[in-house]
Image: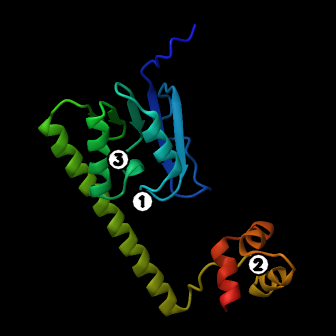
Amino acid sequence: MNTGVRILANVGYIRVSSVDQNTARQLDGVALDRIFEDKASGATTDRPKLKEMLEYVREGDTIHVHSIDRLARSLADLLDLVSSLKARGVSLNFHKECLLFTSEVNHTQDLMLAMMGAVAQFERAISKERQREGVAKAKERGAYKGRVKSIDDETIRAAMAEEGASFRKVAKALGVSLSSVQRAMKN
């Protein structure tokens, strides 16, 4: 008999930055009732499964995340997410950092969250800076030419010449991104 009351849930949130990355190490062995998995950058909160999870969780639920940087890359986004979840009575457990955030007022929790979030944001900024510097040096040496195109612009333009072709249809048919088709037509 369904009484319409949902039992408290242990919810997992898993995120990797790209489709080819493996999620296996995140929350391995943690007993979860439901898992939400995004394959998108953590630099934005515009992630479909994150939004779905935030709509799903209710007061008393616990969200389990492998580490702070899997939930958010900026300190502002992290603090906003955690604050809104705590206000709704949803707990948040970061396994790597061994941090549990509940709706209880705890100034030590708030301090730890701000410090760990700031460290995660700093690490991301340093990593991006090193990447930019490395690409610039490789370009100076002539060693970096960018990614090799999977389909040349001429093939894309030929597909676009077909009657009724749209940018989206051609992108899907050729297995390239919409921006690749747009770039080919602009050149």
Relative placement, left or right, of 23 versus 167 is left
Where is residue 147 drawn, in percent x and y?
Answer: 62, 78
Dividing the picture into quadrants, the one containing residue 154 is: bottom right
Where is residue 113 drawn, in percent x and y?
Answer: 23, 45
Tag 2: amino acid: Ile
Q: 8 or 94: which is nearer to us?
A: 8
Among numbered discs 2 and 3, the one appearing first in the sequence: 3
Q: Which residue is mark 1?
A: 44
Secondary structure category for the residue under label 1: loop
Among numbered discs 2 and 1, the one appearing first in the sequence: 1
- Considering only vertical position in the picture, is 67 above or below 64? below
Q: 19 or 50: which is nearer to us?
A: 50
Q: Is residue 148 visible?
A: no
Secondary structure category for the residue under label 3: helix
Q: Which residue is mark 2?
A: 151
Q: 167 or 18: which is nearer to us?
A: 167
Placement of the C terminus among the 4 image quadrants: bottom right
Please tell me how crowded label 3 is: few (under 14), some (14-19), or many (20+) other residues with Cα within 10 Å: many
Q: Which residue is mark 3?
A: 68
Mark identifier at residue 97? none
Tag 3: amino acid: Ile
The span from disc 3 to disc 1 (Cα, nearest Å) is: 14 Å
Residue at image point 67% right, 77% down? 180
* Outermost residue, right side: 163
Where is residue 185 drawn, in percent x and y?
Answer: 70, 87
Residue at image point 27% right, 57% down? 76
Q: Is residue 82 visible?
A: yes
Foreground tag (3 vs 1): 1
